[in-house]
Image (cartoon, grey):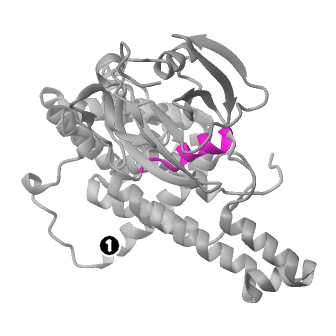
Amino acid sequence: MSGPARQLDPAALGDHVDRLYRAAWALCGSREDAEDLVQETFAKILSKPRFLRNDDDLGYLLRVLRNTFVSRHRSAMRRPQSTPMPEELEPIDPSSATRPDSAVESREVFAYIAALPESFRDALVAVDVVGLSYGEAAKLLGTKEATITSRLYRARAQVARGMDPTRQSVL
Amino acid sequence: MVPPDQDIPVDPLDDELAERGRALIAAAVAETMAPLALRERIEADRARAAKRGAGARLGSRGLLGWLVPAGGLVAAATVALVLVLGGPNAPTVLATASLATGGPVLPAPAEDESNMTVLKASMQGVPFPYWGGSFQWEAVGARDDKIEDRSAKTIFYDNPKGVRAAYTILGGDTIDAPSGSYKKTRNGIQLSITQDKGRRIVTWTRSGHTCVLSAPVAVPEEKLLELASWKGQGSVPF
């Protein structure tokens, strides 16, 4: 069911920056790429008025973020690869500066999510990272809720396995 | 085509791993916030887009081109004056609370070493409280706005679960509580409570200024009232 179109309110976009940033980090596996991806996504959204037929602003924003990520990824594959910044020179995330252990752990968690098979990663980003319901995630990803449930289960287990060096296995 | 992966048998031994993975991801999500620099860039993009949008709506005739045919030069001058001065109406509590949706664009203020119950941030002499010590709600960012030509300063506080509250002090005289709000008294302070767009909003007065505290409705009303009325054993000025 779709209602009358309403314009996406640009003033309310600030509400979603944190969630989109986390989603971007989980897609890219790198904080720097995540910042660029979020800014590019917002620039795209702000470039013209957007009209939605439902109340799911977040689902819409995540869809644009994911599409932007996919097209960036395709473009990057056609360009020469650049060398990433060495780990020890990475800037400190000010939100975690007082908890260095948890900052390292978060970085690892996002890196493992980014390394998951695409279908597992997308389900996990939609539900666990962004907070969509199973139904919303299924709609966004064009699949069934049961499939989302199954992918989430496996994706979570793979992240836990990856974070535990004694139980690592091939993703 | 999506493969029918729900048909793949699930290893029951993975239950524990899946639960651990869920907890690890939840912890990483709770402690990760967008950097302020990114927020600033997005806010700047949004402001530029809003300007472009206003220009596009007015079209090539510009502001006076729209106003003059409608009501003559006197009307145009009157409306232009209202636009410049911000209009005769005081801002509403709901409009003030909506500033929170923009998110922080400035760094969080530090606590004031001379009075450990307040932050080094104030609006017209009214300081914001420091809730880190007593409540574990830490200041994580700030923003300054103009609303109906009045200054408004907002400090954002996060609790350990990453839930965010926004505390705005409005410059100038007090404004009315929203219609439909109800009143409660805590710690000798009268507070008005309402809800809007999934947020619980508490309004009260400190030193002749309206304060607006809002947070997702998941934050219990009592917690918001406790935070709003906290006086830090008398060292937070009211």
Please tell me whether residue A27 is drawn above or below residue B193 in the rendered image.
Answer: below
- Residue B162 located within the stretch drawn in magenta: no
Provide the residue span drawn in magenta: B93-104
Residue A98 or residue A111, whichever sits in front? A98
Please tell me whether residue A40 is drawn above or below residue B90 in the rendered image.
Answer: below
Residue B151 or residue B31, whichever sits in front? B151
Evaluate whether residue A122 shows in this view: no
- Residue holding disc 1: A76
Relative image position of residue A104 (x, y in whole percent): 17, 39
| Residue at 70% across, 45% down | A55
- Residue B98 located within the stretch drawn in magenta: yes
Relative image position of residue B65 (x, y in whole percent): 80, 86
In the displayed image of the protein, which residue is found farthest to the bottom? Answer: B60
| Residue at 80% across, 49% down | A2
The subunit carrying tag 1 is A
Residue B235 or residue A120, whichever sits in front? B235
